[in-house]
């Protein structure tokens, strides 16, 4: 009997002083506790909602030709997803799990990894790195129903309607054409700007870029004239002979959209020839990276980089402030430069599209197809990407926004990395 | 213009001599062990990074840092032999070749872990200003590289044909078991070949990378040098000079005259095409040893 009483004692709620409550009083307390819990849940919905997790796969190159940029580009896009999970996703009841997969910038490697990525992560979005990802997955993504978000400019061979590959920037040819148009205006006169192209056949993307610029030149003979396109190795031995041909041809700018090694080899050839011809690069082989590879930013004096996203200058911009926040609160170790900004922009517009999709379709049962559908339904504003990108209004006409595209141009003056021009209009380039 | 043609031919020949210098690494290792070293390009990268480490990272003067890098490269060669090849004496050549493929992957990983993937500025060892003779313009690094290649070829030819150590290495390449039965230390010969191969690769890196940028992609020079090694025949040091000049001049002229016409890198492909054609006619290459077997 005493044992039963003890058992009974344990099953009754007690007051703070340890006295056993009567049954009606206990029920009242329970009701109050439930009400308090409910009130808390309503007051802080993010904290109380069960989180739904989705996968976001990241295609990276930690052991191939772009291994040098991955610690900046790769880490910054990871940190953006961490930021979004903590500050946005938590309130929406969604967590984006992310993981890197090393493709070595190799289409075959991307293709072989892809089935495993799908089964492991069941991604609703993939963050790509470059042309090989586009070449490997372009045909598969519609069947898999997963959109591929790039950070780079677009490619001619992927310029197709109803694409599952998304670029926040126009094609490299668009960006280069905008830079050439700006250089021509800066020079003055009506003569076309004489341009040389240094490219490589190591990647289909490199050849594609060269062909795009050539197409623009063909359609716009009053704007630019391509003196010659030179294909070299990705690590050229000596290209003074080829560069000499360009100089003799009277080039006023040399476009290099491959890698930093090609920029360094070209600069050395120009130095050897005593010729001062500005080199125009893109974001992935931009001035700070090339300057570092050649031994000093001052050696890139008078050269340019041009691309359709923000410039990582020291000015106080929303992008710079957001970077400082990521650095302070989310341990982003990458330095403030164009590659970090590139990764940030990629992460930001991807999470914003997913965010729009969650708001439209709800946090449950989100799919890659719904994410892509939302991309076309709602623009991603420049404020949402903290100015890292212009406002992006996608249509099914092309993988990149076809209207309102702008290019920013940076240069080195007096050994300093400065913004040369902002919001330069991108000219129309026909498909090639 | 005729002067352009001459300039393209000279620069091509000098580039070919650089390929010959890289190919010497292939030949030295092959002559001592009958092993075709697929990791030759990675040894060039390693040699390059050792120099970058000594001169740029540690800030040693070039006159101290570069010789130190050569010593370190030799030590690496010795380690490679001790760790991977010492146990394979008497085993099939195929097994050794497979090890060199593994070595390629391993060395790339080691370079990535030890030095990172970043593109590094390589020291300016040779003057950046080209040698200008009238209308001719010759890159200084390639000119010095050509001189070094000829000197290295003369030295190695003498070593392999006139010294006891060199001749024993040739015997080792013929057959490990027979060499052992004659009292020759096979391990020592192979170790010496790897040390020599690594030192030659480091010399190649100086010429190739002087004043340029360095990361692991520089290993592609190993494949660019492949037609030279195969064209010469894998045993001939002197033959490398001629094969290098042939490949280089073809590449230089094709780059100058065919690339603009075709709109592609014909210059990079043509040496391989010509190498294949010559190998069809002479499978041992231009100067490779013909093996006569009596049954």
Image (spheres, rainbow, N blue to C red):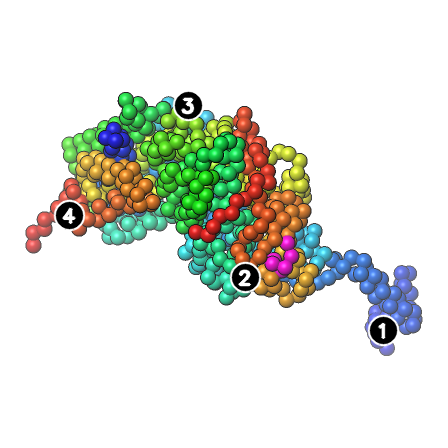
Which chain is home to disc 1?
A
Residue assigned mark 3: B61
Q: Which residue is mark 1?
A: A8
**Could you tell me if residue B251 is visible in this image?**
no
Q: Main secondary structure of the magenta part?
A: helix
Q: Which mark is residue B282?
A: 4
Question: In the rendering, at what x and y percent does residue A252 appear?
Answer: 44, 32
Residue at mark 1 shares a chain with residue at mark 2: yes
Q: CA distance from mark 3 to mark 1?
A: 87 Å
- The quarter of the image holding the N terminus of chain A is bottom right
Q: Which mark is residue A146?
A: 2
Camera-near label (4 vs 3) is 4
Q: Secondary structure at mark 3?
A: loop
Q: Quadrant of residue B15?
A: top left
Whether label 4 touches label 2, CB < 8 Å: no
Viewer-side label of 4, 2: 2
Residue plotted at (42% across, 45% down): A218
The residue lying at 7 percent from left, 54 percent from top is: B295
What is the C-alpha distance between the residues marked 1 and 2? Answer: 58 Å
């Amino acid at each position: 009997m005493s044992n039963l009483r003890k058992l009974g004692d344990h099953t009754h709620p007690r007051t703070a002083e340890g006295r056993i409550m009567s049954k009606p009083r206990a029920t009242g307390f329970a009701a109050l506790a439930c009400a308090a819990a409910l009130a808390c849940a309503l007051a802080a919905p993010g904290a109380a909602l069960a989180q739904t997790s989705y996968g976001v796969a990241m295609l990276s190159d930690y052991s191939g030709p772009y291994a040098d940029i991955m610690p900046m580009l790769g880490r910054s896009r990871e940190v953006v997803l961490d930021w979004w999970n903590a500050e946005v996703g938590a309130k929406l009841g969604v967590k984006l799990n992310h993981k890197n997969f090393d493709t070595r910038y190799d289409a075959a490697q991307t293709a072989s990894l892809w089935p495993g990525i799908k089964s492991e992560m069941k991604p609703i979005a993939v963050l790509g790195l470059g042309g090989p990802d586009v070449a490997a997955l372009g045909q598969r993504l519609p069947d898999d129903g997963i959109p591929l978000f790039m950070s780079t400019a677009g490619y001619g061979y992927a310029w197709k309607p109803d694409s599952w590959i998304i670029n926040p920037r126009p094609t490299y040819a668009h960006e280069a054409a905008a830079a050439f148009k700006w250089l021509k205006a800066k020079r003055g006169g009506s003569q076309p700007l004489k341009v040389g192209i240094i490219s490589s056949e190591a990647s289909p993307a490199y050849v594609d870029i060269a062909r795009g610029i050539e197409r623009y030149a063909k359609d716009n003979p009053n704007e630019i004239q391509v003196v010659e396109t030179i294909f070299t190795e990705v690590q050229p031995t000596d290209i003074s002979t080829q560069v000499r041909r360009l100089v003799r041809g009277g080039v006023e700018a040399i476009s290099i959209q491959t890698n930093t090694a090609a920029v360094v080899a070209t600069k050395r050839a120009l130095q050897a020839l005593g010729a001062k011809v500005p080199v125009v690069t893109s974001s992935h082989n931009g001035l700070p990276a090339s300057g570092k590879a050649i031994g000093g930013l001052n050696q890139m004096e008078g050269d340019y980089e041009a691309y359709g996203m923000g410039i990582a200058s020291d000015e106080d911009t929303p992008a710079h402030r957001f970077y400082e926040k990521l650095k302070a609160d989310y341990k982003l170790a990458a330095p403030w430069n164009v590659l970090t900004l590139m990764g940030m922009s990629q992460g930001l517009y991807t999470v914003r599209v997913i965010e729009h999709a969650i708001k439209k379709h709800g946090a449950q049962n989100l799919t890659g197809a719904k994410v892509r559908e939302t991309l076309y339904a709602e623009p991603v504003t420049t404020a949402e990407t903290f100015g890292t990108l212009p406002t992006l209004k996608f249509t099914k006409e092309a993988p990149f926004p076809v209207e309102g595209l702008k290019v920013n141009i940076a240069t080195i003056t007096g050994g300093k990395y400065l913004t040369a021009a902002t919001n330069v209009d991108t000219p129309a380039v026909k498909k090639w | 213009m005729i002067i352009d043609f001459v300039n393209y031919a000279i620069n091509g020949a000098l580039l070919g001599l650089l390929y010959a210098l890289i190919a010497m690494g292939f030949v030295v290792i092959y002559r001592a062990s009958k092993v075709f070293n697929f990791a030759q390009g990675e040894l060039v990268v390693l040699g390059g990074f050792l120099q970058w480490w000594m001169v740029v990272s540690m800030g040693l003067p070039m006159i101290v840092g570069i010789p130190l890098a050569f010593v370190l490269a030799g030590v690496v060669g010795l380690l490679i032999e001790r760790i991977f090849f010492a146990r394979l004496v008497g085993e099939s050549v195929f097994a050794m070749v497979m090890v060199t493929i593994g070595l390629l992957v391993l060395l790339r990983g080691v370079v990535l872990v030890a030095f990172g993937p970043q593109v590094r500025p390589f020291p300016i060892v040779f003057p950046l200003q080209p040698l200008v003779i009238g209308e001719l313009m010759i890159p200084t690094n390639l000119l010095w590289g050509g001189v070094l290649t000829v000197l290295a070829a003369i030295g190695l030819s003498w070593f392999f044909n006139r010294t006891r150590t060199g001749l024993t290495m040739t015997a080792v390449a013929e057959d490990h078991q027979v060499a052992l039965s004659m009292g020759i230390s096979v391990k020592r010969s192979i170790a010496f070949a790897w040390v020599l191969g690594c030192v030659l690769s480091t010399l190649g890196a100086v010429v190739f990378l002087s004043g340029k940028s360095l990361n692991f992609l520089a290993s592609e020079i190993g494949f660019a040098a492949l037609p030279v090694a195969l064209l010469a025949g894998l045993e001939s040091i002197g033959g490398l000079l001629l094969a290098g000049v042939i490949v280089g001049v073809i590449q230089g002229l094709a780059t100058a005259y065919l690339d603009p016409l075709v709109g592609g890198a014909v210059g990079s492909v043509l040496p391989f095409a010509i190498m294949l054609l010559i190998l069809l006619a002479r499978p041992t290459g231009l100067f490779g040893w013909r093996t006569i077997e009596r049954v």
